[in-house]
Amino acid sequence: MINTELSNIAEIVLNQRKFFQTSKTKDVDFRIEQLKTLKQAVIEHKQSIIQALQADLHKPEFEIYMTEFSIIKEVDYAIKHLKTWIKPKKAAVSWEFFSYFAQIYAEPLGVVLIIGPWNYPFNLIISPLVGAIAAGNCTIIKPSELAPHTSHVLAEIIAKYFDPAYIAVLEGGVETSQELLAEKFDHIFFTGGTAVGKIIMAAAAKHLTPVTLELGGKSPCIVDTDINLEHTIRRITWGKFLNAGQTCIAPDYLLVDKKIKKDLVDGLQECLKEFYGEQPDNSPDYARIINQKHFDRLVSFLKDGAIIIGAETKPSELYIAPTLIDNVSLVDPIMQEEIFGPLLPIIEYTNIAEAIALINSRPKPLALYLFSQNKNLQKRVLQETSSGGVCINDTLMQFGASSLPFGGVGDSGIGSYHGKASFDIFSHDKSVLQNSFWLDLKWRYAPYKGKLPLIKKFLG
Ligand code: NAD
């Protein structure tokens, strides 16, 4: 583990630059070897990772396997496809370039920085790291200080398996982040809130460093009448209350067709009992809020609207019951910021145009959910709204498809990753045009006398 008090950040970055300059990371076999090492490291330390996540978030082991260890699939996917991704891609050229050969090389960027959040504190560090390794970079990682157990485990594992001149974890809070941001990196990959995202981008701008910003926002979930009600209820309940609602793409609020609202609300209440029992605080399957600050923030939202079910709290355990809320006003604090907790406001609409207008009056969300089998409605919502991604008739599952780039748009983020997109985001597309020596037509060289009609004919 690298302790920032003992090691100078500038020195660590410099050592990584030196390591990168050896070109070792450019070798595809080296990259594959490192990915295999990463996978092995995760597998060998599953138990300590589970313990850390439980200490930080009270995460059920099942959820850890589903949402944190799912990263192993991303590693396998990268190992399987890397030799194809890395191949220079031929680019077609127009007939004027008949003697040329054009290719695009995916070139590693150099030394990159990954800054992570606390809600999926393992996955959201390792997942971008897979892309950074696959693309041939050296990496410095700054996990979230708000999930300290996971941060320590990450630091221990990375230090055990990787040379710090290649991959290093720097633990710490905002000051560590700020010290890191004072250095020049070749890319910064940040996952966190929109407000901090702006700080990261401003710091990166000083060095002209490109950024990927994986941010959050209020992800709406539209529920139409043309649905399988039972499946809809289960999928919404799961997506909202997994990790006690502390998921960047959790449905933030429901927009429900008035005609189906009562059935949906009744069903959601039943489903909560089915999932977590009459007393969710006794359920082994229900997580806790990360810290006092977020607990207090969420409790303050309970003043808004009318509680349908839930709202019980246990401050000593940072427990908030799964809560459904009716009659919220759009100006209530709960509808002004990302909830990021187990509270679900339910808003009704009479016409889909109202729901679309509400979504479009707000910053572009990270995810948009639509429950409807109506093809025309699906088409309309897709066409008339903008969001990082859309999932129709389900929740959260879009995160797990390696073939789908995952990221935000507008206030919900810049850039996307997962699968090939992770490789792309940590690579530079270097265009290489090559001419041959068998012919050298003089049409472009001075003196230009007499050549103007020709250039006009072809390019004018
Ligand atoms: P955060 O923005 O508070 O912190 C994220 C990281 O930034 C931490 O490592 C923290 O140390 C660092 N940081 C905090 N303040 C800083 C500052 N002033 N200067 C420099 N660095 C600073 O986010 P969080 O609370 O850890 O996570 C919650 C947010 O992250 C939510 O908004 C959620 O939607 C979003 N999120 C997005 C995704 C995604 O994939 N798009 C995934 C998870 C979480």
Image (cartoon, rainbow, N blue to C red):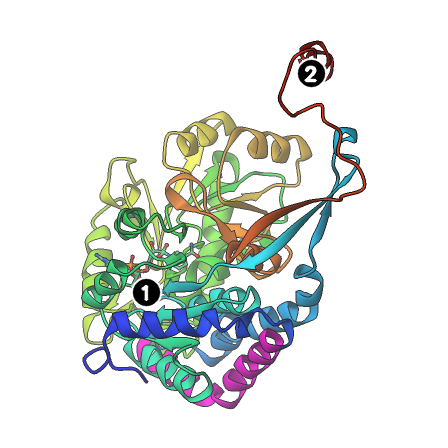
**The disc label shown at residue 321, or none:** 1
Question: Which quadrant of the figure shows ligand 1?
Answer: bottom left
State whether residue 308 is above or below residue 438: below
Counting other residues with Cα less than 10 Å from the Cα at mark 1, is it few (<14), some (14-19), or many (20 or more)?
Answer: many
For the point 63% across and 68% down, the residue is 78
Q: Amino acid at mark 1?
A: Ala
Q: Secondary structure at mark 1?
A: loop
Place of residue 228 in the rendered image (x, y in percent of width and height, measured from the top left): 63, 49
Which residue position is annotated with label 2? Answer: 455
Residue 280 location, quadrant: bottom left
For the point 58% across and 35% down, the residue is 382
Residue 190 or residue 330, whichever sits in front: 190
Residue 118 or residue 302, whichever sits in front: 118
**The disc label shown at residue 384, or none:** none
Place of residue 277 in the rendered image (x, y in percent of width and height, measured from the top left): 43, 72
Residue 263 or residue 45, whichever sits in front: 45
438 part of magenta stretch: no
Compared across the picture, whether 130 is left or right of 140 comes to right
N-terminal label among 2 and 1: 1
Range drawn in magenta:
30-56
For the point 66% across and 66% down, the residue is 82
Q: Nearer the viewer, mark 2 or mark 1?
A: 2
Place of residue 291 in the rendered image (x, y in percent of width and height, measured from the top left): 23, 69
Place of residue 302 in the rendered image (x, y in percent of width and height, measured from the top left): 24, 53
Q: Magenta segment, principal secondary structure?
A: helix
Quadrant where the image shows the C terminus: top right
Counting other residues with Cα less than 10 Å from the Cα at mark 2, is it few (<14), some (14-19), or many (20 or more)?
Answer: few
Quadrant where the image shows the N terminus: bottom left
